[in-house]
Image (tube, rainbow, N blue to C red):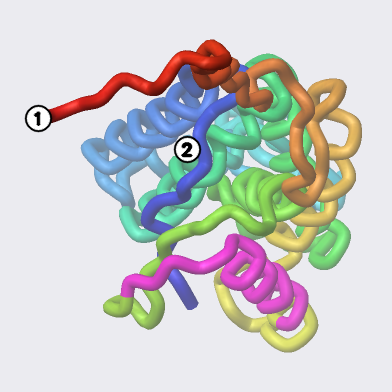
Amino acid sequence: MFIPLHDANNLKFIKLQWITWSLIAINVIVWIVTELAGAESEFSTAAVLGLGFIPSVVNDIAELPQSMVLVPEDATYITYSFLHGNLLHLGSNMLFLWVFGDNVEDAMGHIKFLIFYFLCAAAGAFAHGLLLPDSQNPLIGASGAVAGVIAAYLMLHPRVRVWVLVLGRIPLPLPAFIPLMFWVIYQFFMVFTDFGNEVSWAAHVGGIVAGAVLVLVFRRPGVPLFDRTIESPEAVVHEAPQPAPAKTAAGTPPPKWGR
């Protein structure tokens, strides 16, 4: 696979990506708090069971003890996305969100992007529950939401140059559609071939589908898809008129220079 490092894609409508930064900060803070408490501690276990998405509980096949219920069952469609199992899980999700989230937020606006992010998270949980309706294992992680962001970025900016680290060591500048399309195809391949892994490929696919559909609705009016040019005053280059060359009066010999 690949690791995204940077994209050459400036913001056009917003000055700062407040929502992207805030989501990253909240995810990091939640991970630090649960990590300080200890991965096997009663606090962390209660957080995972109370905030994680458990298909069998949401589908009324199983029931959590009342003492472990922290939020309404439907709220776990979103709350699960703020929990992560380890630093690699957190770091990979936040890196993708850092590189690609700002431009999607720019294309939608702050509030719409936040709603979009939560809907992609919910779609990821829904797809996971659809594939494993009786699972009692909590689903955690922002992968579904981030997958939606990646799909939206691919729809908006497929030709933007993105620096990626291939095979963990080779930095390459590539058009965004090459690594991102490969990533999307890989998620769909894995959801049909890898059933025993701890990774919820269904959540990734659910987020991808939601992101690709919702970007059509949530993007600002006039924001094009597939890197078509935005017609705006800022895109017009104004050239100063060039003064006409001076004309020599008829019958007047040109001045002599030098000796």
Above or below: residue 109 compared with residue 182: above
Residue 202 at x, y percent in the picture = 75, 65
Residue 187, quarter of picture: bottom right
Q: Specify the label residue 192 is tagged with.
A: none
Does residue 240 appear in this view?
no
Q: Amino acid at mark 2?
A: Ala
Q: What is the x, y in percent for residue 75?
A: 72, 28
Give the residue drawn at x 54%, y 45%: 100
x 22%, y 37%: residue: 36
Residue 175 versus residue 212 in the image, above or below: below
Look at the image and tell me whether residue 89 can be seen. yes
Q: Which residue is mark 2?
A: 46
Q: Main secondary structure of the magenta part?
A: helix
Look at the image and say whether residue 106 sits in the magenta stretch. Answer: no
**Residue at image location 31% in from the left, 20% down from the top:** 255
Determine which residue is flagged by label 1.
Answer: 259
**Left or right: 93 in relation to 134:** left
User: Which mark lies nearer to you, 2 or 1?
Assistant: 1
State the extent of the magenta-drawn residues as a range.
171-189
Say left or right for 94 vs 147: left
Quadrant (top left/top right/bottom left/bottom right) for the C terminus: top left
- Please tell me whether residue 176 belongs to the stretch shown in magenta: yes
Please say if the residues under marks 2 and 1 sit with CB atoms less than 8 Å apart.
no
Kindly give the residue lying farthest to the bottom in the view shown. Answer: 193
Circle 1: residue type: Arg
